[in-house]
Amino acid sequence: MSFTAKVKKKLKNGTWYPFYNTFYEKIPVDKKEILIVSRSGLALESNILAILKELSSPEYQGFRKILAVQKDKKEQIKKKLERYGIKIDGFVHTSMPSYYHHLAKAGWLINDTTFPGRYIKKEGQTILNVWHGTPLKRMAQDNEEERYDAGNVMRNLLQSDYLVFPNLYMEEKMAGATNLTELYQGTILHEGYPRNCIFFHPEKGALLKEKLGYSGIQLSVYMPTFRGKTDAVEKDSYVALVKDYLRRMDQQLTDQQILLVKLHPLVQSQLDTDSYQHIRPFPTEYDTYEILNACDVLITDYSSVMYDFAVTGRRILLFAYDMEDYQGHRGMYEDISAYPFPILRTPEELTAELKKDSGHPDDDFLRKYATFEQANATRDICRHVLLEEKICQEAAMPGTKKKRVLLYAGSLQPNGITTAFYSLVRNLDPEKCDYYISYRSISLKEDPKRLQSVPEGYHFYPLATEMNLDVITAIAQLIYLRFGITAFGIGKRLDKAYRREWKKHFGCVSFDHVVHYDGYENYMIALLEKAPCTRTIWAHNDMEKWVAEKHNPSFYLLQKAYASYDHVVPVGEDVRASADHIGGHPEKVRVISNIMDYKRIQNLGQLPVSFDPETESTVPLSRLMEVLEGNDLKFINVGRFSSEKGHERLIRAFTRFWKEHPDTWLIIMGSRGDLYEHTCKLAESAASSSHIILIKYMSNPMPVVRSCDLFLLSSFYEGQVLVVPEADILGVPAAACDVNGARAFIQKYGGTLLPNSEDGLVQGMEMFLRGEIHTMNVDYEKRNQEILQKCEELFQE
């Protein structure tokens, strides 16, 4: 997407905020209005269609029924309503402000997927969610590819007053995938799916089969899961494969067999069934489940439709020609080969199996996957929820007796804070607290794999959307962040805005403790300040110096946060004074150093040196290896290419030393930062340029560090420096300029501090040459246990 397109999209997405914020604040909830959405407005089908049919009954005449649709689907949906004689009181287009008007107004909201990420549930609103299917494929936080972006699904389910689960298997999987088990405070309805009620009327299926002209023949339906992607090449390849399979099936079918085909619209639109003798398109003038009720055999693969169709007791065949590949890529909760349905790999095997009487669901399958299915499910659900007649079997989630701790991790960019965070979560015991790792989905969109370093046992709680920011609030926020002004209603407006944001993201759940571990980001600092529980914010740097130089986060916001949060945690004693000064409440400050995952560091150091695809370097890997394996003296520095890291003075100091000792090298490795190109130019202009190597980003820098002779920290300030103990763990001596963030650790463990200057760095190189700098004497296991105890005591407060 081009820059212009991104700007236009952002402006378009933001246009509803002023409307919606006003609607949310000003419009009262109307308990006579029901807002109904099917498949985000793309269609009218399945559970929602069944519910709308029920709501046409006289008992619900007192309600106004508003159906939200996508504009280009309105006529199609309107015809479906007319076909079934369903009357509603109005349409709203999901792309218009009127949709957000009704989201703020409706007393009842019924959905089978999710409401938009900017929606905020109001007091007095009741939400019924009839999710669109029993999951076989791993979903939400159970799926590594989805978990970074599962926030809106989780949020919608957690804020629902009623969730319908037609079987205990679905309840177990969805509850685990979306944090329902521990956090859901609403009501579970153990009730059948509305769309499946029709399966208890086989006579209606027989009549429809006759009407369609298929009496006396075997009527099958093929409903596969779509495996193509938006990539045109892959989609075309998948379409070609499907066409070939259908051609081969058609050749094997008899005149007493008809196969209806219902494919993904991207595929169906490219399929001309006129060329087939025994294959027909799925009739679009009827609801999917009406047609299914008329069929004798369901052919599918990994679709949840198999669990629905099993209610009929009729045959199910699984045409899973790519089962191993699909399961490995997508992940499934169960092994379908254990199901009582034949698994076929070729069109020829499938058509041969159609001639048998195989694939009927057995009693065990029905007990597990159709536990609560029954003929009156739709009626009972609607009466139970809307008319408050307690007909359905209710259940509640067990919750948890452990403390619920939200850990905001930041963007998880490859930097020191992320390293420290991963070291922490690898050592915490998830049995002592329920930990929910939170992050903004947008910050992980480019690289969701960053979450793969989180060990088992943790929950995830992504934040799906950015701020619902109207123009006036945006101006007020800008004035406050820049000048600290809260008069003229600015403070009150921002307070209201961030309380609204808290309600949007977390209003449906309760935590015992929220931890802003990252410690940066204006939005998150202000958001988590509104948490109605214990609040802690980490300080990974000398924030006085950082804010003075970077102006981000806002000093005024940070000052307010350090004063209002319950705890401020600097990561070293020598940066404690900064936290004291900013917040003015030294009694809230509690120093907790960073855990060093020393065993992992040692293991990483033993791996071969390798560049990543995105690694940039002033020398090729082969030349780097020659230097590392050579006998020349090698100094190394690891830190982002940013001004506070002091790389400029390090290059100057090295050049002075190199003139006297030309058999020496300087290697500077940085994960991120804006000054890489600038630093390259500095190195190129230095007399020692032929002996300076700059590397931007290596996911594993440890083998390089391990191959060097001395680690030199040239920073002007730090938080609690990690790279010095990392070098020490790898057996590499380290010396650091005498600055906050390095001083306390090095003094405590007998390391080498240098004058905070270019001369001091030269002095360090000369000291090492004389054999005066050695590794430190640190018991990292004991140190980690002491830090871990402090963290766990804090989180359980």
Image (spheres, rainbow, N blue to C red):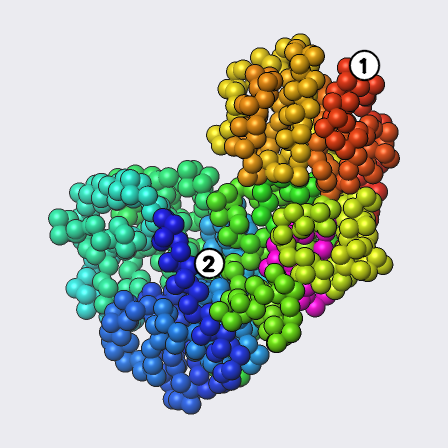
On the picture, is 597 further left or further right than 313?
Answer: right
Q: Secondary structure at mark 2?
A: loop
Q: Is residue 531 magenta?
A: yes
Query: Amino acid under label 1?
Result: Arg
On the picture, is 61 further left or further right than 505?
Answer: left
**Residue 470 can be seen, yes or no:** yes
On the picture, is 257 further left or further right than 129?
Answer: left
**Residue at 86% in and 35% down:** 748
Q: 543 or 216: which is nearer to us? A: 543
Rendered location of residue 61, percent (x, y): 39, 89
| Above or below: residue 352 compared with residue 385 | above
Which residue in the structure is indicated by mark 1?
770
Earlier-in-chain disc, 1 versus 2? 2
| Above or below: residue 285 compared with residue 179 | below
**Residue 174 can be seen, yes or no:** no
**Residue at 67% in and 67% down:** 530
- Pointer 2 local density, CA inside 10 Å: few below 14, some 14–19, many at least 20: many
Snapshot quadrant of residue 178: bottom right
| Above or below: residue 260 compared with residue 49 | above
Q: 317 or 646: which is nearer to us? A: 646
Snapshot quadrant of residue 678: top right
| Above or below: residue 612 compared with residue 73 | above
Query: Amino acid under label 2?
Result: Thr
Q: Secondary structure at mark 1?
A: loop
Say the numbered circle drawn on residue 134: 2
**Residue at 62% in and 27% down:** 668
Residue range in magenta is 518-540
Q: CA distance from mark 1 to mark 2?
A: 70 Å
Rendered location of residue 669, percent (x, y): 61, 29
Rendered location of residue 97, percent (x, y): 39, 74
